[in-house]
Image: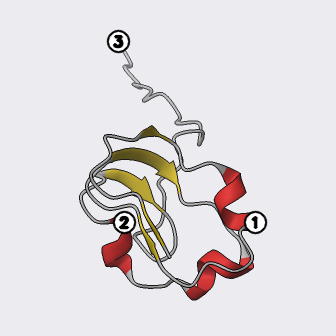
Amino acid sequence: SLDLSRNQLRGEIPQGFADLKSISALNLSTNMLSGRIPMGDQLRTLDDPSIYSNNLGLCGFPLEDCVSSSTPTQPETSLDED
């Protein structure tokens, strides 16, 4: 069990969390975490979204999918025929 809730943690969750082998409970709630939740076999077993609650910048399983900002957008073109 690892409870890191309410520790004012900022930024992304380190990929190393996905490599933890024997963790059965994790609480990262009420911090200032952001970015994609790392993918890993052990983290996928921790599928209760409440362990990530109150981290408004987090996304990915088991939360909502991340919106990619790297998708290029096409500028609008105007076809004025004067």
In the shown orientation, is residue 44 left or right of residue 32? right
Tag 3 and tag 1, C-beta contact below 8 Å: no
Q: Residues within 10 Å of mark 1 (few under 14, many from 20)?
A: some
Coloured how? secondary structure
Image height of 67 relative to 50, above or below: above
Q: Which one is earlier in the sequence, the residue at label 2 or at label 1?
A: 1
Quarter where residue 42 is shown: bottom right
The type of residue carrying mark 1 is Asp
Disc 1 is placed on an element classified as helix
Measure the alpha-carbon separation of dots 2 and 3: 56 Å
Task: Identify the residue position indicated by label 3 in the image.
Answer: 82
Q: Look at 31% across and 61% down and name the residue there.
A: 29
- 61 and 6: which one is in front? 6
The type of residue carrying mark 2 is Tyr
Residue 23 is situated, as x and y percent measured from the top left of the image, at 61, 78
- Name the disc covering residue 52, or none: 2
Residue 64 is situated, as x and y percent measured from the top left of the image, at 40, 69
Task: Identify the residue position indicated by label 1 in the image.
Answer: 19
- 40 and 57: which one is in front? 40
Measure the alpha-carbon separation of dots 3 and 1: 62 Å
The type of residue carrying mark 3 is Asp
Disc 3 is placed on an element classified as loop
Tag 2 and tag 3, C-beta contact below 8 Å: no
Quarter where residue 39 is shown: bottom right
- Name the disc covering residue 81, or none: none
Measure the alpha-carbon separation of dots 2 and 1: 18 Å
Image height of 79 relative to 19, above or below: above
Q: Look at 56% across and 85% down and name the residue there.
A: 24
In the shown orientation, is residue 74 left or right of residue 17? left
Q: Which one is earlier in the sequence, the residue at label 2 or at label 3?
A: 2
